[in-house]
Amino acid sequence: MITTTSRPDFLHSEVTPKAHYLNRRRFLGGLAAAGLAFPSLAGTKFTGVVKSPLSTAEKPTSYDAVTKYNNFYEFGTGKDQPAETAQNFQTSPWTVVIEGEVAKPRILDLDAILKIAPLEERIYRHRCVEGWSMVVPWIGFPLSALIKLAAPSASAKYVAFQSYYDIRQMPQARYGGIPFPYVEGLRLDEAMNPLTLLAVGLYGETLPNQNGAPLRLVVPWKYGFKGIKSIVKIRFTAKQPPTSWSMANAREYGFYSNVNPRVDHPRWSQAKERRMGEFFKRDTLLFNGYADQVAALYSGMDLRKDY
Ligand code: MTE
């Protein structure tokens, strides 16, 4: 485990873009100066992280639950498996390919990705289609910042994401039961929504491997499976891209997957949820409580048909 500094987070008002840049440099420079190839940066503290006004005031779920109760089928289908079997997952060096209907296709390494925009802490509700939910203090930046950098062309209507996949590092994947590499997608306007986050950390530190290190998507008004982990490719497309879960079972999993208490999954009611750490179930909210920010994206659509 590597910690580079003991400096506490800045308060929102104290942070300048320069301070971000310098802290970012210190974080990454420290690693490079050590001259070592780190197989994983998991557990490295971030500094200079802005607290986002988009955070929920709800109490975050314990670090233990967030990092030990996971879905990451490449590392096994048991909730407790990824925390164990992803321990040695190699996440450094890491590159992300940006391609498709864009003016500026490119390959970015993690260092370049961390410089795209100031890092923010965003505390979001996280609702899985299986009926459990959490509140997670993510660290990341709006996906829109990366999209602007890529400059999508007029023909780009969707964004397709692909996870890293290597059976040698992920031997449990053979029992996953869904096609790999894991793929997901968003409509371009969903991807551009200010809530959509590219997360690089949680609880003040780089993402644990089991939570999708070094880089994953977080779309808080959609079911958790839209939050694709360990992203290696982002492709802009004219047509709606395939997604792993709808390829595995189209009747159960649609492209949109907006949290909707009125549309039940064929096997699970979506009306209520169990918040990890709580005993009684609570009502699930339309768009997971983010309706004010995202309902307009779907005006005129039948959300029963487009589930
Ligand atoms: N990404 C990949 N590559 N593989 C997966 O199996 N599972 C999804 C999503 N992203 C998954 C994935 C599902 S079903 C959920 S609920 C969330 O990750 C869980 O994220 P968490 O473990 O950080 O809570």
Image (cartoon, rainbow, N blue to C red):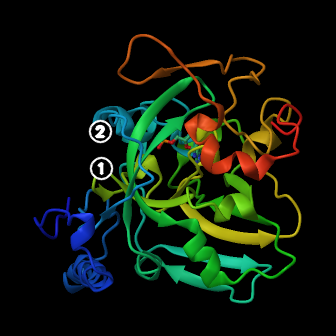
Q: Quadrant of the C terminus?
A: top right
> Which numbered dot is residue 154?
none
| Residue at (25, 62) in percent of width and height | 44
Under mark 2, the amino acid is: Tyr
Under mark 1, the amino acid is: Tyr
Residue under pointer 1: 203
Q: Quadrant of the N terminus?
A: bottom left
Whether label 1 touches label 2, CB < 8 Å: yes
269 relative to 80 in the view: left or right: right
> Which comes before the other along the chain, label 1 or label 2?
2
Q: Nearer the viewer, residue 243 or 81?
A: 243
88 relative to 290 in the view: left or right: left
| Residue at (42, 31) in percent of width and height | 80
Q: Nearer the viewer, residue 92 or 171?
A: 92
Q: Hey, which quadrant is residue 188 in on the image?
A: bottom right
Locate residue 123, reporting x and y percent.
40, 47
How crowded pointer 2 is (Cα within 10 Å; few <14, some 14-19, many 20+) is rated as few
Vertical relation: 168 (above or below) 47: above
Locate residue 27, reporting x and y percent.
24, 76
Ligand 1 near label 1 (Cβ, under 8 Å)? Answer: no
| Residue at (73, 17) in percent of width and height | 267
| Residue at (20, 66) in percent of width and height | 10
Locate residue 151, reporting x and y percent.
69, 84
> Which numbered dot is residue 63?
2
- Asked whether the viewer can see residue 214, the reply is no
Query: Circle 2 — which element?
Result: helix
Query: Circle 1 — which element?
Result: loop
285 relative to 123 in the view: left or right: right
Vertical relation: 307 (above or below) 237: above
Figure quarter occupied by ligand 1: top right
Q: Hey, which quadrant is residue 41 in on the image?
A: bottom left
- Asked whether the viewer can see residue 167, the reply is yes
